[in-house]
Image (tube, rainbow, N blue to C red):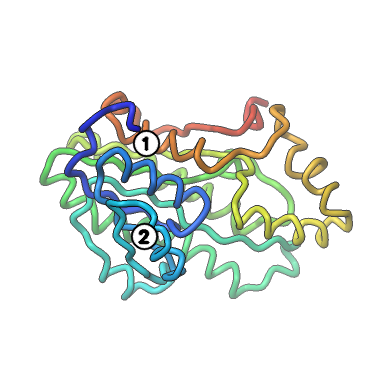
């Protein structure tokens, strides 16, 4: 149940990357709080399963790397959660150029386009909430993740600009910065990291993923979903232009 009964009633929220992981958790939290959630993802089957499970969620299949697809998405949203992400782990000299470009389109260009086409509606209503799912890698860097780190650092800057421009219109913009979350994206990374670092998968979790994390555990998607819900609620009216780490003290040094 929502901490803020009725606050999200009547709000239209769009969550990208909603078929699994953090996006799925955020979509569920917002729907349970009363929002009508437009769940966006390339995985149409996953969206249909989510919508069948949770009332208030509308599946909206879309390829976020396609500009025409982005333009066709609804623009009358009050809450925008830019969450969709992909990953490739590779030394920079071997990094496939086409993967770098794809990661930029999905994780940096698409949020810019979605913000651009959503803020006129928010400005007209004098209210809006934009939550950009960044990462601990939006605040810190790691080897072999040149595209992901570049995209997340860019998202941090974009979010701050939107906060400055949106403030006078009642629109806030923030980033959420998790460490490793128990999602399909992270599970896929374990094998990739094992190859890149030439070590076993158990070693990757302990020595790579949790090395800089002082709270030695993977984060559950629902924890991040709760933070997203809070950042769209009434207590967040002045929370804008900043980052909210949920990283087990990774960014504390």
81, 134: nearer the viewer: 81
In the rendered image, the vertical position of residue 63 relative to residue 190, given as above or below: below
Image-quadrant location for residue 72: bottom left
Q: Is residue 143 left or right of residue 124?
A: right
Q: Residue at x 43, y 56 (%)?
A: 18
Residue found at the far front of this picture: 53
Label 1 – label 2 distance at C-alpha? 21 Å
Q: Residue at x 57, y 54 (%)?
A: 150
* Res 66 label: none
Eye-nearest disc, 1 or 2: 2
User: Badge 2: how crowded within 10 Å, few (<14), some, or many (20+)?
Assistant: few
Where's residue 38, x and y in %? 30, 57
Image-quadrant location for residue 249: top right
In the rendered image, the vertical position of residue 147 relative to residue 43, given as above or below: above
Q: Is residue 15 left or right of residue 250?
A: left
From the image, which quarter does the C terminus lie in?
Answer: top right
Where's residue 39, x and y in %? 35, 58
In the rendered image, the vertical position of residue 87 relative to residue 212, given as above or below: below
From the image, which quarter does the N terminus lie in?
Answer: top left
Label 2: which secondary element: helix
137, 53: nearer the viewer: 53
Q: Is residue 100 left or right of residue 154?
A: right
Q: Is residue 161 visible?
A: no
Residue found at the far left of this picture: 124
Label 1: which secondary element: helix
* Res 229 label: 1
Mark toward the start of the polypeptide (1 vs 2): 2
Where's residue 139, x and y in %? 58, 39
From the image, tell me which residue sits under label 2.
Answer: 52
């Amino acid at each position: 149940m929502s901490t803020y009964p009725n606050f999200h009633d009547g709000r239209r929220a769009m969550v990208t990357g909603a078929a699994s992981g953090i996006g799925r958790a955020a979509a569920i939290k917002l729907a349970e709080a009363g929002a009508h959630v437009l769940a966006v993802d390339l995985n149409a089957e996953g969206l249909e399963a989510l919508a069948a499970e949770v009332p208030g969620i509308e599946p909206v299949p879309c390829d976020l790397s396609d500009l025409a697809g982005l333009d066709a998405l609804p623009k009358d949203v009050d809450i925008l959660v830019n969450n969709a992400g992909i990953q490739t782990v590779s030394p920079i000299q071997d990094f496939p150029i086409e993967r770098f470009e794809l990661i930029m389109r999905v994780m940096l260009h698409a949020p810019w386009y979605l913000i651009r086409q959503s803020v006129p509606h928010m400005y007209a209503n004098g209210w809006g909430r934009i939550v950009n799912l960044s990462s601990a890698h939006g605040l810190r860097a790691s080897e072999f993740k040149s595209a992901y780190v570049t995209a997340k650092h860019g998202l941090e800057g974009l979010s701050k600009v939107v906060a400055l421009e949106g403030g006078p219109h009642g629109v806030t913009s923030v980033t959420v910065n998790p460490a490793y979350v128990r999602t399909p994206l992270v599970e896929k990374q374990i094998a990739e990291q094992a190859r890149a670092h030439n070590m076993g998968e158990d070693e990757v979790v302990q020595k790579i993923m949790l090395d800089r994390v002082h709270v030695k555990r993977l984060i559950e998607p629902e924890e991040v979903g709760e933070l997203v819900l809070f950042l769209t609620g009434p207590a967040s009216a002045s929370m804008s232009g900043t980052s909210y780490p949920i990283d087990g003290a990774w960014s504390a040094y």
